[in-house]
Amino acid sequence: MKADRLRRFIDLHAWAGMVSGLLLFVAFFAGAINVFHHELHHWQDRPAENATVLDADTFLERLTERFPQAAERLYFQPGNDPAAMWKQDGEWQTARVSHFGGDDGYLSRPGSELADFINELHYQLAIPGGAGLLNIGMILMGLVAALYGVALFSGLVIHWPKLGRELLALKHQGNLRRYWKNLHNLIGVVSLPFHLIMAITGAAMGLFTVVALLLGALVFGPQLQEVISKKTDVWPAMTTSGEPVTMALMADYLSAAEHEVPGLQVAWVEVRGFGDSDGWLDVAGTVPGYLGHHAHVVLDPTLKPLRVISPAQRDLNNASLSVVYALHFGDYGGLAVKLMYFLLGLLGCLLFVSGNILWCERRSDRAGPSRASALLLRLTLGVCVGVVAGVAVSFWVSKLGLYSPWADQVVWLERLVFWLVLVPLAGWSLRASPLRFCGQGLRVLPWLYLLIPVLSLVLDGARAWRDPDVLLINGVMLSLAGLLWLVRKHFRRRVRLAEPHPLWVGRVSDGHPIHKADAELES
Amino acid sequence: MRLWPAALLSLPLSVMLSGLLAAALPVPWASWLVLMLLLVVTLWMLLVALAALPQRGWPALAGLLAANGVALLLLQTTTLYGGGP
């Protein structure tokens, strides 16, 4: 490839990566934890002290009697302490079997929504207003994912001729920038398929509304909306007939679904029109052994199958939708694949940080000291340290809050503390010397994550290791602490071995090169 | 920076090119809607990358604008708009 064309590819790669890098860091860090979304839901709950155990059917009857809006549409989740979710006056509510006492009493217990917060941070940066069709945060993330795709494509063109060499090129060579570059290339090459999957599926999910609007306006006309509903809804939304019907037992619905799809592992049941003759139930779950493992069995209240969507019988739309979800969320291969996604997600974070650092140093070397590159370097460090610290503190508040007098406020407190940590840290990073900020941040971060399993151990007692989901999340947090400690160790070694780039020391407004203070050298 | 105008002009073009492919293929377009969505975003990424590459920006952007017009005209010759799945 000609040198000037290669340079333009490098510029495009740098610009697209730099514009999207910081937001991608947030999405990837939250996404790596979100791989364990289901387990995190269990981790965040305070175990029920209520010994009364209702069966699923009595639970649903009492729930719909107490909250008639739940009868219109609810999601039932089987398990040790079965739960139901429904929309009450426009807000999603969750109730568990343990919320109901032996008599007709309903005890609303405060709960944490940490898993949902991490999920929102992942797909919409926790920007409020996610209920409607035009979800600003989600569209923004879709655009960022598209830019990320552009950066990947240009990166692929740049590195394709030397892929093999770069796989083994992580050497220090006495040059810190060379080290960052080698690290960036190595991670990019090793995890390229993962990043291609994330860029395409992330952009498709985030920009679904925008693309559907454009397809409708430019290509297919107003009919498109109806066609999309028809092709992607498992069964049409119902209108209440007003004719009551006696519901079968939940266990019978589940076994009817398992009869239709052998090997089905039920995840949840959507109930439309509970107790209405026109109602229906969608028993949804997975069939292990398939990449597109999602399955749905739609039943009427009398157990008659209305529709079956399974890996063995489904149309192209449902098959590709299932594969897209599975590839994005990494839930198709059990714990091993989930752990792989977790590690690849964290490596992705390192990819974005190293990419931004490379851009800043390269620009500073080529064009001389610049306020823009100094600011971007500081902002990159501030946002990264702030997000990692903020998430850890949200975990603390989620766990501690439920055992405190402010248990009712945990839902908003765990969100608030994230921003209360992130914003001042980002602000501080703009003023502090990057080398010192990074050194101090990395000194504290492993301890923040180490404290999470300790808190769980102290507050949850034996549940911290006996409940497999709680144990897994505690293990994930412990491994995060270990990985952050490794990054810290590596960072310190690099600082000892090679002189930092002038951008890493001094103030933004100082001249170039900048002389390092002794204290900074030590840190 | 020509990345933004390139992104803005490439999105409708990738949507219309996918529409033209839907018109050309002998299968009902409604049967592969999800794949079409993936195709649109992949095509968009590639078009942005290609449009942002040339040394001078305006010929690429003018080319994108013209391609949008041509794709829109070609779409008028199909029965996709309001024509049923």
Image: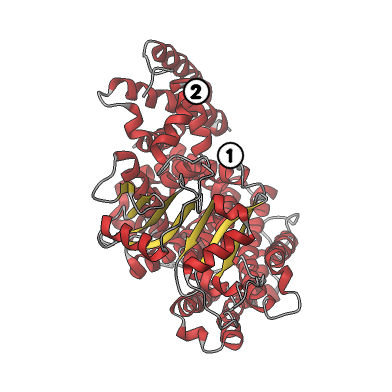
Q: Residues within 10 Å of mark 2 (few under 14, many from 20)?
A: some
The kind of residue tagged 1 is: Leu
Q: How many marks?
A: 2
Residue A290, position as x, y percentages in the image: 27, 56
Q: Chain of mark 1?
A: A
According to the image, label 1 marks what residue?
A133
- Which image quarter holds the C terminus of chain A? bottom right
In the image, what residue occupies the spot 45% across and 71% down?
A79
Q: At x 46% / y 85%, what residue is drawn?
A: A466
Q: Earlier in the sequence, mark 2 or mark 1?
A: 1
Label placed on residue A222: 2
Give the spatial CA distance, label 2 vs label 1.
16 Å
Does residue A273 appear to the left or right of A286 in the view shown? Answer: right
Residue B74 screen position, x and y as percent? 39, 13
Secondary structure found at label 2:
loop
Can the viewer see residue B51? Answer: no
Pick whichever, A15 or A96, lies toward us. Answer: A96
Dot 1: what SS?
loop
Q: How is the image coloured?
A: secondary structure
Q: Residue at x 48, y 72 (%)?
A: A55
A388 horizontally vs A285: left or right: right
Is A5 in front, or is A467? A467
Judge if badges 2 and 1 mark residues of a common chain. Answer: yes
Pointer 1: residues within 10 angstroms few (<14), some, or many (20+)?
Answer: few
Q: Residue at x 57, y 41 (%)?
A: A139
In this orientation, which residue lies closer to the viewer: A68 or A269? A68
In this orientation, does residue A512 appear? yes
Label 2 chain ID: A
